[in-house]
Amino acid sequence: MEKKDYLDLYREMVVIRRIEERSAELYQKGKIGGFLHLYIGQEAVCAGIGSVRQPQDRIITAYRDHGWAISSGIDPKFVMAELLGKVDGCSGGRGGSMHMADVEKNFWGGHAIVGAHIPIAAGLALGDVYQGNDEAITICVFGDGATNIGFFHEALNLSKVWNLPVLWVCENNQYGMGTAVDRASAVSEIRQKAEGYGMRNERIEGMDVINVRKNVSRVLDTIREEGGPYLLEIMTYRYRGHSMGDPERYRAKDEVKKWEEEDPIGIFRRYLIDEDVATEEVLDEQDAQAEKIVQEAVEFAEASPDPEDETLFEHIYTEPTPVDYRGYALEKISEGK
């Protein structure tokens, strides 16, 4: 990367952190409703993957999606507006925290139901195969808790049977809600669950954005060259509770403190200084720019209007358009031909 790329990546991680911190404040003030799942501590995963995926690569994730929305290219203003349920939000204020999306950026959304998006990812990849998008990879992100349900196993099985170009990414942040991984999973490493399907897999450390970039770039190249699915378990940690209503009684304060000492933003900051990419002063300037971006996002969101009541039932259904897959046009099928 060029120096500007490094600084942009650093600033993006800080923006994600500050967006989440401001979101917590706004939630406590009653300006954000519903559920709110913060991404604090996991920034290196989405920033690292977002920096190496290609424009044709799809990303789909679960409900802890604010960081993924930003790393996919959605303006923080539209992310914050969506959090506040405003008309200028990336989902028109209809989805809120758990349903951010922008298909023009190939970000196919956050999904609220645990694991429900995993088979959708297989469908996205199958669609690319049908349409001859040979260089496209679907990157599907989920938590460790989602690997214990049927959606996960059904989708992984079919992705291997059909040799679909999917990078399955498990963000293992050590807990499924308030349950430690080793109390809910029969195997100690989530990546082992791919073995039953004869699928390539590995586990990597996810608190260092450079490490994430290097390994994910290598895996994406492998999928593009050889085809087929790949399961990547990325070890990370969330510093806040599962959601804003989490009393956090299930983990020791010393454990959280230990992980906070390996803060992904701090690790990257030290790397940039040690490698003479940037000085403390330059990075402080990036911090200030991030603060300004987030403040402007909050002001934009608060000034954005609420959706009108009469639009409540808009965008629920869509009119189907004929699509030709493998030479069979749907309009011909509808005519009985």
Image (cartoon, helix red, strand yellow):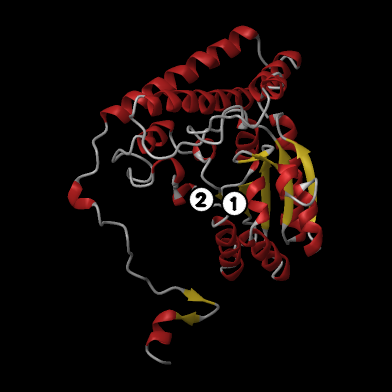
- Placement of 335 over or under 259, stated as above or below: below
Q: Position of residue 246 (x, y in %)?
A: 53, 33
Report helix, strand or loop for mark 2: loop
Q: Which residue is mark 1?
A: 57
Q: Is residue 214 left or right of residue 312?
A: right
Q: Which residue is mark 2?
A: 106
> In the picture, residue 237 is in which quadrant?
top right
Residue occupying the point 66% across, 26% down? 2
Q: Nearer the viewer, residue 183 or 114?
A: 183
For the C terminus, the image quarter is: bottom left
Cα–Cα gap, marks 2 and 1: 7 Å
Q: Nearer the viewer, residue 276 or 228?
A: 228
Is residue 239 visible to us here? Answer: yes
Q: Nearer the viewer, residue 336 or 276?
A: 336
For the N terminus, the image quarter is: top right
Q: Nearer the viewer, residue 73 or 197?
A: 197
Q: Position of residue 333 (x, y in %)?
A: 43, 86
Does the CB distance between marks 2 and 1 fall below 8 Å? yes
Q: Assess disc 1: are there few (<14), some (14-19) or many (≥20) residues with their C-alpha within 10 Å of its C-alpha.
A: many
Say which amino acid is labelled 1.
Answer: Asp
Residue occupying the point 60% across, 29% down? 249
